[in-house]
Image (cartoon, grey):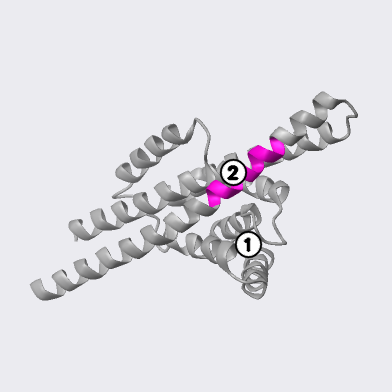
Amino acid sequence: MRNKKMTTNARQIAIVTIVVALLGGCAQTKEWMSSMRRSMSSSDDTAILGAPDAEYYLDDLYKLTTGDPATQAEIFADAESGFRLTPGLNTNLRFALVLATAGHPETNPEQAQTILQELLTQTPLLTPAELSLATINLKSVEQQIALTSEARNLRTSSSQAARTESASINQRLDNAEAENRRLRQELDDAETKLEAISSIERSIRAQEQ
């Protein structure tokens, strides 16, 4: 039983490590990862009964970034319905993560920021994985909002310097999106490998039993 718990924690750490790389890209990434590992290590005996694991949320994010418009619309509608009809920590976090994910028509960093800030006032009720996802995504949308605001202000300026800076910011955004696409592919590959490892472990346990 203890080995199973350690495997589950290791799996969550591996998945969320990739998400940090996917959504981060700033100097605070190492600090967040260190904090996340400590919180997961210290929570072995304090798991919240019935709380979903990281994959519950990551599945939506993966489909949002790789799915067709119909799939994206379905995921958004389902997440929004849960948020409106059965509000709670899990449904609110799921909806906030959907809003924070770029690449689909319903992306809304501002609304995601509001929901995530509210969720992070209730940290004792969040699992370590949920806390990490909420914190990482809040930092990400805050950066998006700041960059968008900066770009908007610069675009209103008629000076050459402002236009040059705006182009630089747009290039940074383009570079970040390109990097995110690469990291999303790595996330997919890592999840496939993790699933293969889990299958092997289940097979070994079955043979031992």
Is disc 2 placed on a helix, strand or loop?
Answer: helix
Q: In front: 202, or 67? A: 67
- Give above or below for 30 relative to 13: above
Residue 88 visible from this viewpoint = yes
The residue type indicated by label 1 comes to Pro
Q: Is residue 203 left or right of residue 192?
A: left
Q: Residues within 10 Å of mark 2 (few under 14, many from 20)?
A: some
Which residue is situated farthest in the left direction here?
A: 208
Instruction: Give the residue at mark 2.
Output: 176
Residue under the image location 52 percent in, 62 percent down: 62
Q: Nearer the viewer, residue 1 or 12?
A: 12
- Would you place residue 7 above or below residue 69 in this image? above
Residue corresponding to mark 1: 87
Whether residue 126 is in magenta: the answer is: no
State the residue at coordinates (65%, 63%).
Answer: 83
Provide the major secondary structure of the magenta segment: helix
Q: Which element carries disc 1, helix, strand or loop?
A: loop
Image coords of residue 208 (percent x, y) = 9, 71
Left/right placement of residue 68 relative to residue 156 reads left
Sooner in the amino-acid sequence: mark 1 or mark 2: 1
Q: CA distance from mark 1 to mark 2?
A: 32 Å
> At 15% across and 70% down in the image, what residue appears?
205
Amino acid type of disc 2? Ala
**For the magenta stretch, what is the residue range?**
169-180
Q: Residues within 10 Å of mark 1 (few under 14, many from 20)?
A: some
